[in-house]
Image: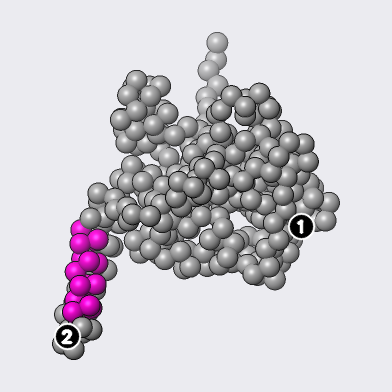
Amino acid sequence: MAERILDFEKPIAKLEHKIEEMKELSHSSDIDLTKEIEKLQNKLNSQIEKIHSNLTTWQRVQLARHPRRPYFLDYIKEITSDFIELHGDRHFADDKAIIAGLATIGGEKVVLIGQQKGRNTKENLFRNFGMPNPEGYRKALRIMKLAEKFNKPVITFIDTPGAYPGLGAEERGQAEAIARNLFEMARLRVPMINVVIGEGASGGALGIGVGDIILVLENTWYSVISPEGCASILYRDSSKAPQAAEAMRVTAQSVRDLNIADEVLPEPNGGAHRSPAETAQIVKSAIVKYLKKLKKLPKDELLRQRLEKYSKMGAWEDIAK
């Protein structure tokens, strides 16, 4: 896969290329360039910090979509060593855009469910670009009910541009499948933690996104519609997606300020794609922390707090007639 460099990352890539050239030169000619390389490395670190401390909303959207950003399977490999995948919705098919199974995190037996994209064209076709069909949401619900039966917490990883909008998906009840999941997740009698690791678009994200705790990584976005979709509707021009993203307040920090997310998880300097292993450990630590808190709650109190959490979302006014 050809290296993709975002426009605002080009100064960083230029310095990285120069460092690699100096390392090769030092190795091939036996010239000690340690001090020069160290100076460039310090300059690189400063450049990364400078750029990433002043990102626009649209730049964060781009980072959330970065092709080297860790996906759900990457997190599975880093935070657990005993994942057992479970397949199929027992009605139609096994949707490869959603992966679900059993695992252990921090000594706690849990159920993991997440959306998975591909790294190249072949993988994206296999994973349907991370866009689940109805059978994907029904598989997720089947596994959630299994978790409830055996009293195991559910952790979901959200990373999708949206539920698949194809004719077949609509014929098989895409809207009903997502609505059913919302209804069932709201009353599932086990702790649920949702982690937005990339894109969190529309009902496609909400289909596995109703829980007790919502965590969002620093360079992710979460919204009722993609910036491009919003721009196409409001401005009749999808190229105005950056403007739409700003207006919709889709960034992790905005989602936290709106009391939708419970915590924004920091990413390593330069973004999750620069250090996937470190990012995974940040996510793991947060999951373990909140699991300990949620496990202490009686089931009825867990459901009461979950209902209260979602009842408080949003803002409105009563206008006297």
The image shows residue 172, relative to residue 210, as above or below, that is: above
**Residue 186 in view in this figure:** no
Residue type of the residue flagged with mark 1: Lys
Residue at position x 39%, y 31% in the image: 228
The percent position of residue 156, horizontal first and vertical second, equals: 62, 51
Determine which residue is flagged by label 2: 29
Q: Marks 1 and 2: in contact by CB < 8 Å?
A: no
Q: Which residues are magenta?
A: 11-25
- Tell me the crowding category of disc 2: few under 14, some 14 to 19, or many 20 or more residues within 10 angstroms, Cα based: few
Of residues 261 and 42, which is closer to you in this image?
A: 42
In the rendered image, the quadrant that contains the N terminus is bottom left
Determine which residue is flagged by label 1: 152
Mark 2 or 1: in front is: 2
The percent position of residue 314, horizontal first and vertical second, equals: 54, 33
Q: Is 45 colored magenta in this rendering?
A: no
Residue at position x 52%, y 36% in the image: 162
The percent position of residue 163, horizontal first and vertical second, equals: 56, 35
Direction top: furthest residue: 321
Count all numbered tags in the image, as a single digit.
2
Magenta segment's dominant SS is helix
